[in-house]
């Protein structure tokens, strides 16, 4: 019913706290995320995430599995090809999947667009095809809650190349406002994407300041 991720060693020793913070920040911005917490076990911090694809049946006293597929599976792409540059899904592939297969398309597209903006603004370069999933629940297909939200750019040893190209660029430091316009054209949604970008960026700044956290990407 839960996923446990012990903190790593060396440069990545704050990974558990990083993910916990980013997941909570997403929740503050009304993005769908699972319930999370940090457990301290002696000298070890453990990130704990409640599984959204499990449901407790109180009548039977059993755990039921809710069917989910990550976007690589849903698009028929091999699991080890999760990055766009290697042949994995692009933002447009994911967008088309939602348009063609999902229930409540407008609502689900809105969540997906906001997740792109959020991952960019926190500096998450590892938002690949296996980090987006769909769920089959109540006869509907919808996005799963967001997961694996981590600011990767705070770790110098990790790549600054994004898992999916945004506009004309993979390198997060090279992405500008024009890339959001370009991505809006690719999605054929005109200025809606860039309007959401400005709105969400300001909200994230406010949340970061309220928590007194410093983010070089958001600054």
Image (cartoon, grey):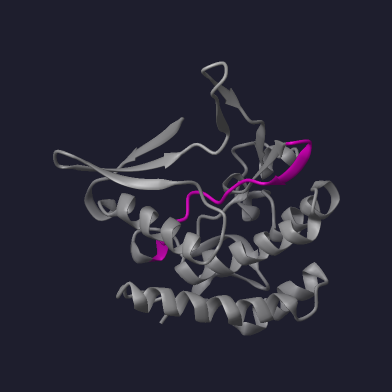
Pick the residue in front: 58 or 55: 58
Q: Which residues are magenta?
A: 138-153
Name the residue: 47% across, 74% down.
204
The residue sitting at 68% across, 80% down in the picture is 194
Q: How many marks?
A: 0
Side (left or right) of 161 relative to 210: right
**Is residue 180 or residue 51 the one in the foreground?**
51
The x and y percentages for residue 66 are: 63, 31
Q: Is residue 56 above or below residue 164?
A: above
Q: Residue at x 37, y 53 (%)?
A: 20
Q: Residue furthest left?
A: 42
Q: Is residue 36 left or right of residue 163?
A: left
Q: Nearer the viewer, residue 139 or 98?
A: 139
Q: Is residue 144 magenta?
A: yes
Q: Quadrant of residue 91?
A: bottom right
Name, please, the residue furthest toward the top. Answer: 60
Residue that sits furthest to the front in the current view: 59
Q: Position of residue 58 (x, y in %)?
A: 54, 23
Residue 124 showing in the rendered view: no
Q: Residue 116, position in %: x, y? A: 61, 64
* Vertical position of residue 145 compared to residue 73: above or below: below
Res 54 → quadrant: top right
Q: Residue 49, relative to residue 173: is it above or below?
A: above
Principal secondary structure, stretch drawn in magenta = loop
Place of residue 196 in the rendered image (x, y in percent of width and height, measured from the top left) = 65, 76
Q: Is residue 169 in view from this perspective?
A: yes
Judge from the rendering whether residue 210 lies leftward or rightward of residue 142; answer left or right: left
- As for residue 83 lying within the magenta part, the answer is no
Which quadrant would the C terminus be assigned to in this image?
A: bottom left
């Amino acid at each position: 019913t839960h996923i446990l991720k012990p903190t790593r060693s060396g440069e990545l020793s704050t990974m558990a706290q990083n993910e916990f913070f980013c997941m909570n920040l997403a929740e503050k911005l009304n993005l769908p995320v699972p319930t999370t917490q940090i457990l301290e076990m002696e000298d070890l911090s453990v990130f704990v995430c409640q599984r959204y694809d499990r449901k407790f049946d109180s009548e039977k006293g059993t755990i039921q599995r809710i069917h989910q597929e990550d976007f690589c599976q849903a698009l028929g792409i091999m699991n080890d090809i999760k990055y766009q540059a290697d042949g994995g899904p692009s933002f447009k592939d994911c967008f088309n999947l939602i348009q063609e297969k999902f229930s409540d398309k407008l609502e689900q597209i809105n969540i997906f667009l906001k997740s792109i903006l959020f991952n960019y603004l926190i500096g998450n370069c590892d938002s690949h095809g296996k980090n987006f999933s769909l769920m089959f629940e109540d006869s509907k297909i919808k996005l799963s809650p967001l997961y694996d939200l981590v600011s990767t750019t705070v770790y110098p040893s990790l790549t600054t190349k994004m898992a999916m190209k945004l506009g004309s660029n993979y390198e997060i430091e090279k992405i500008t406002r024009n890339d959001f316009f370009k991505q809006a054209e690719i999605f054929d949604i005109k200025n809606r994407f860039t309007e959401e970008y400005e709105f969400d960026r300001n909200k994230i700044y406010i949340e970061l300041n309220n928590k007194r956290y410093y983010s070089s990407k958001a600054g």
